[in-house]
Amino acid sequence: MAKNTKKTEAPAPAPAAAPQAPAEPAGKPAGGLFGYAPAPESPAAAGDIASSYGHFIGGQFVDSSGSEALKTVNPATEQVLAEFARGTAEDVDRAVAAARAAFTDWSALPGSERAKYLFRIARIIQERSRELAVLESIDNGKPIRETRDVDLPLVAAHFFYYAGWADKLDFAGYGPNPKPLGVAGQVIPWNFPLLMLAWKIAPALATGNTVVLKPAETTPLTALRFAEICRQAGLPKGVVNIVTGDGSTGAALTAHPDVNKVAFTGSTPVGRAIAKQVAGTRKKLSLELGGKAANIVFDDAPIDQAVEGIVNGIFFNQGHVCCAGSRLLVQESVQDELLDALKRRMGTLRVGDPLDKNTDIGAINSAEQLARITALTDAGEAEGAERWSPACELPGTGFWFRPTLFTGVSQAHRIAQEEIFGPVLSVLTFRTPDEAVAKANNTPYGLSAGIWTEKGSRILWTASRLRAGVVWANTFNKFDPTSPFGGYKESGYGREGGRHGLEAYLDV
């Protein structure tokens, strides 16, 4: 690969070609009564994207010990954004050594002093939120209004929240004077690159640990920009280290003998492999894996409100959400009314340029993910389910998939059992609350669920019987840094967020 010429500064910004916006957004409001003029955010707001990146180790950007490079592309245009290093075992060794060297001084700091750094990082994130939101949309494919209005505010909020805990750990319920674990090896996914970084780094630093983080191979850019923020905040060298690469890099990190804590968010098969890898060691492990959430609509639910929750539950972030409400369980007596309203609403969704502020559904993150979505939806049709999508013309370049609805789905269908991780909703029906609970729990996953009803007693009855880590009532996909998040069964174990998220990084 083309190596960095400067090792003591951020990579020299060799100007990359300005990302090209895709064709006119494809979705149109139902009936065509109210059109939208394009309202694109400027890709220049993302700042300079270097042509080539190395790793961030010991407070400096450094070249990789290997020569292999990977490329990250804009999913909406298929344009190459930058090359980045494929981390080797030697690179991981250097990063872990830097984190270990920094641990002694960082863990010895009073919590109030660590909190100052986290507060400073949070403020810088707020100040640079437009830049980070645009960069995230370019690298990931998600709509700018989601990165701008959801992701970035939550990223800053997590650093603010855990900064507040840093000097109060004695009162967190884990005993007096709880101790940090040491070096945390963290591997994050591509669906919420910067938010997942915040979920992991903020509590680790607040509790006195140091970090080596490996971002996803399709979305490394905001993690590398976060490295610049760490330097801007004056964070001591080695406290945060970022090693880019693919699955082999992540495996080298989670297997490293000097890592004390492994945190992983991603697919269930990879999580299962990591669990086997660390079994028998003294490493602490938390896993946040796949999901196949049920969104349950009872016959007394407010239909219009439920439709909005269903749309948000499955089409937010193109369905690239572990806790997406990908199974709709609707009571038979309101099925027709609900589906008519849902189809009308789906007809208003706009699919197209992620940087257009009117876009509802952006680009699928990669060609590989698009192929998986396509294969599973084809299987749904082959098994007899009825497929429906609103009419829309997709852009000619990039990775796109129409919002899709399947009816006539049975519990045995692959689309009802396997995580599609795309904008695809499977509809099943039920007659009684007991049947709804049985069908909702008939999945190997247990990450989240939703309940729609006007009766508080029914909410409590249903929620207490659902085997899911998070249950939303008359809403969906609501997140807050003060609230724990995590699953059961093949959705993993451990909790992130809230006071509960501290435990994963403390020796208790």
Image (cartoon, rainbow, N blue to C red):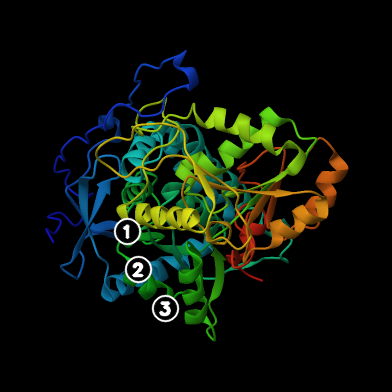
Mark 2, mark 3: which one is toward the viewer? 2
Q: CA distance from mark 3 to mark 1?
A: 18 Å
Residue 118 in sight in this render: yes
Q: Earlier in the sequence, mark 1 or mark 2?
A: 1
Q: Quadrant of the C terminus?
A: bottom right
Of residues 437 and 260, the one nearer the viewer is: 437
- Residue 433 against residue 362 in the figure, above or below: below
The residue at 57%/37% (across/down) is 311
Residue ranking furthest to the bottom: 280
Q: Amino acid at mark 2?
A: Gly
Q: CA distance from mark 1 to mark 2?
A: 8 Å
Q: Is label 1 in contact with label 2 (beta carbons under 8 Å)?
A: yes
Q: Which residue is mark 2?
A: 247
Q: Which residue is mark 1?
A: 217
Q: Which residue is mark 3?
A: 255
Q: Amino acid at mark 1?
A: Glu
